[in-house]
């Protein structure tokens, strides 16, 4: 009996140790929310964590895609979230017809947090007119609107800049093309679409720091704001992931653009100190 008990204890210890080894950890931080995208291949995203937005109204940026809620455009595969931009004529329930479809996911109403580390490991798509993003919006957007709610763009890339990503904040008096941002470039001839990279912000009451692969490249503080404007990063924000097609900033696809294009997201993780 004692041998059986000892064997059982060893099995229990092994099981617990294995579980602990797969739990995301980061020294100095406590995980508060994550999605590892380990659902069955072809399955939809976890509806307890994400809302799939839909529409083809240009989204304020003259975008050309129609965001759908279909698993054609957003699904889990091989331990990743796949957001797929497809060249296809599509008419939504609102009667709007577009020549491209894609997906836009948000955690609004499911999860939001004030301050902490927000990170995702992503392999971005590529090509002229392709615009992937990992970003956040203030969860009071329904009450105060944009940009008073605040926006933190953890990672944006426009396809014509394959070696560069951007981190930006938007608020009242410094939004749109007046957003306060910084670029980060890969050295040599590296392209972000060739591999996964970790994009993150560490957000405190009076500072937002931007990282690529744990390398800090920008810090935003209230001192940088235009005179008379407000620092609006003192309330919870929710997460967004999307791949836009076309728009005023990236420009539209051209003859060099290839479809479909996919953004792979290995995980999204949120921590508190």
Image (cartoon, grey):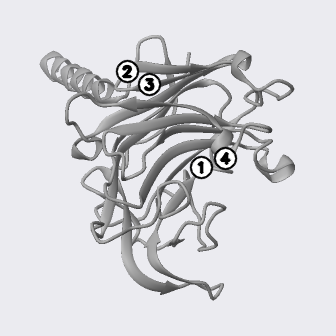
- Tell me if I can see residue 47 in this picture: no
Residues at circles 4 and 3 in contact by the CB criterion of under 8 Å: no
Q: Do the residues labelled 4 and 2 touch (CB within 8 Å)?
A: no
Q: How many labels does the image show?
A: 4
Which residue in the protein does label 1 denote? 107
Pointer 4 residue: 176
Q: Which of 231 and 29 is in front in this view?
A: 231
Lower sequence index among marks 4 and 2: 4
Q: Disc 3, disc 2: CB below 8 Å?
A: yes
Q: Position of residue 12 (x, y in %)?
A: 26, 25
Query: Badge 1: how crowded within 10 Å, few (<14), some, or many (20+)?
Result: many
In the picture, which quadrant includes the C terminus? top right
Q: Mark 3 points at which residue?
A: 211
Residue that label 2 marks: 214
Q: In this view, does 266 lie to the left or right of 136?
A: left
Q: Seen from this angle, which residue lies furthest top?
A: 28
Q: How crowded is mark 2: few (under 14 residues within 10 Å), some or many (20 or more)?
A: few
Distance from Cα at disc 4 to Cα at disc 3: 22 Å
Q: Please tell me which of labels 4 and 3 falls first in the chain.
A: 4
C-alpha span from label 3 to label 1: 22 Å
């Amino acid at each position: 009996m004692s041998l059986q008990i000892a064997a059982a204890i060893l099995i229990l210890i092994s099981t617990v140790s294995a579980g602990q080894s797969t739990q995301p950890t980061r020294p100095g931080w406590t995980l508060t929310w994550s999605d590892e995208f380990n659902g069955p291949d072809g399955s939809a995203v976890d509806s307890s964590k994400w809302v799939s937005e839909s529409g083809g109204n240009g989204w304020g940026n003259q975008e050309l895609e129609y965001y759908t809620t279909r698993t054609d455009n957003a699904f889990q595969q091989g331990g990743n979230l796949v957001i797929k931009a497809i060249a296809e004529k599509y008419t939504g329930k609102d009667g709007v017809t577009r020549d491209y479809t894609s997906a836009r996911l948000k955690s609004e109403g499911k999860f939001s947090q004030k301050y902490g580390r927000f990170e995702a490991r992503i392999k971005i798509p590529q090509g002229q007119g392709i615009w992937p993003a990992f970003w956040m919006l203030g969860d009071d957007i329904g009450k105060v609107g944009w940009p008073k709610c605040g926006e933190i763009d953890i990672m944006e890339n426009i396809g014509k800049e394959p070696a560069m990503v951007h981190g930006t904040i938007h608020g009242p008096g410094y939004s749109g093309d007046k957003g306060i941002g910084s670029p980060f470039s890969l050295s040599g001839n590296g392209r972000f679409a060739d591999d996964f990279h970790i994009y993150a912000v560490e957000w405190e009451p009076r500072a937002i720091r931007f990282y690529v692969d744990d390398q800090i490249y920008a810090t935003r503080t209230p001192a940088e704001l235009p005179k008379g404007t407000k620092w609006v990063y003192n309330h919870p924000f929710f997460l967004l992931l999307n791949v836009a097609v076309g728009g005023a900033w990236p420009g539209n696809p051209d003859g060099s653009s290839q479809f479909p294009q996919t953004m792979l997201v290995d995980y999204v993780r949120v921590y508190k100190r």
